[in-house]
Image: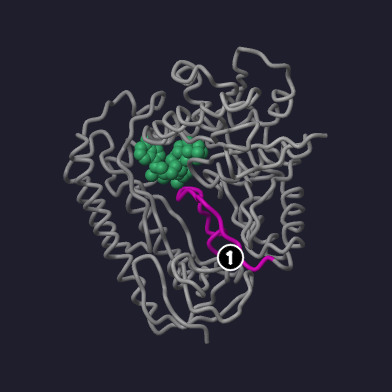
Amino acid sequence: MDTRKVYIETYGCQMNIADTELLVGLLKPHGYEPTQKAEQADVILLNTCAIREHAEERVLKRLSELVRHKARKSGVLLGVTGCMAQHHREQLLDKAPYLDLILGPDAYRTLPNLLAQEETDAPLVAVRLDRDETYEDITPVRAEGIRAWVTVMRGCDKFCTFCIVPYVRGRERSVPLKPLLGQVRELAEQGYKEVVYLGQTVNAYRDGEFDFADLLRQTAKIDGIERIRFTSPHPSDISERMIETMAMLPKVSPYLHLPVQSASNRVLERMERGYTVEQYADLVGRLRRAIPGIALSTDIIAGFPGEDADDFHATRDFLERIRYDFAFMFKYSAREGTKAHKWGDTVTEDEKGRRLQAIIALQERISGEVNQAFIGQTVEVLVEGPAKRQADWLSGKNGQFKTVVFPGNGAQPGTLVSVRVATTTAHTLIGVAV
Ligand code: SAH
Ligand code: SF4
Ligand code: F3S
């Protein structure tokens, strides 16, 4: 069989990165090898995101650049997969009529067949959402390293009013526990040290009587896996048992990404997030009592429809109160098809920008202060490899998922090294091995 080459560019969240590894895994048995160079590829795919308008604009621009590869060699196929393919299939066909393939997140299994088909002029479109598809039997071709991303559930049933995900990823469904643990055992045998469980509401994981806490407990028993992390948990789905489980298992990282979105009850209600500010703050209190030193991060949306100055100040003050380790912050972007889309975009772009800049600056200061508290402490670092900016330095993460860099001491990737922190920035701990 001739090897053909596939080039995939990935946009969006970690679930999409994992889906790219899945796509490569699906194509491999059909004679395809991944390549990092679009110039060498027979198949070029953009695995896309629809979460904000900006993400979609980037893809359209990129397509207009990549289309030249179709002229380079006959038979080169250009396609769009992922959330934007699901969201905007018609518009994509309008704006990029040269596309050969449009494939939604539940249609990846059809890809090898579509590629094997005789050439046609019409683009091949597969965007049926499938409430049962979990790809549990497909082995992704993973990036080498010490960390493996493992999708444990797909879809989302929460329907937050601003969010496109439930429409493009379909209904919530989990990979059954047994094949999932089998996969992780295999990863441990291959030398992976850390698993990161993925799902849009990862802690809604369920297989019959087994829930997310069971998944964590079973995973912790697997020899060779040193660290277990997951993203994104939904605040409403965090059970007492999940907290207890995190507290009792040393392998589970003391780190949680807990998106709050806003700290105004009026806004949270219209977002239909399913919690109040008080409930969320109470949850943070319980987490911090049960898991001392737990690191917390969050997501914030600035300028949701109807967000006034008071709502915004409440969110700003909440950042001061919680003191997250870090935060991802976004300007609201109206998404066609969501409930909030009908409410328009009431905060001007300028005002959204001002609000965003204000909370980014604030959080930068807080992140810096939180990290300074690590100076003088010794942290345990799982080494990943060479540091990006400094030759001969190593980089890795501590349990709280903070990047730690230190002068190389000969430690290999995948080993644990104790590092004494000497200085810090808002994003990094800098120290020496002890
Ligand atoms: N499932 C995760 C969030 C996934 S999307 C959760 O519920 O926690 C990642 C982040 O993108 C969200 O937390 C939100 O902050 C942001 N986001 C989602 N839709 C958005 C929109 N329409 N405009 C701006 N930001 C948005
Ligand atoms: Fe979107 Fe809400 Fe689902 Fe997260 S929980 S993916 S924000 S609908
Ligand atoms: Fe984007 Fe889809 Fe992830 S919309 S954030 S790539 S689930």
The furthest residue to the top:
121
Q: Is residue 428 magenta?
A: no
Above or below 139: residue 404: below
Name the quadrant containing residue 341.
top left
Dot 1 amino acid type = Val
Q: Decide: few, some or many residues near mark 1? Use Cα within 10 Å; few <14, some 14-19, many ≥20.
A: many
Q: Secondary structure at mark 1?
A: loop
Circle 1 sits on which residue? 252
Q: Identify the residue at horizontal 29%, vertical 61% (top origin).
A: 364
Q: Identify the residue at horizontal 63%, vertical 38% (top origin).
A: 40
Quick check: can you spot residue 274?
no
Q: Is residue 229 magenta?
A: yes
Q: How many marks?
A: 1
* Residue 184 in picture, x, y percent from top left: 72, 56
Q: Identify the residue at horizontal 45%, vertical 15% (top origin).
A: 94
The furthest residue to the front:
72
* Residue 226 in picture, x, y percent from top left: 65, 68
Q: Quadrant of the N terminus?
A: top right
The furthest residue to the bottom:
434
* Residue 351 in picture, x, y percent from top left: 18, 40
Q: Which region shows up in magenta? A: 225-244
In this picture, residue 412 sits left or right of residue 267 = right
In this picture, residue 210 sits left or right of residue 377 = right
Above or below 152: residue 119: above
Name the quadrant containing residue 17.
top right
Does the Cβ of the disc 1 residue fall within 8 Å of ligand 1? Answer: no
Q: Identify the residue at horizontal 58%, vertical 37% (top origin).
A: 39
Of 204 and 102, nearer the camera is 102
Ligand 1's quadrant is top left
* Residue 51 in picture, x, y percent from top left: 43, 36
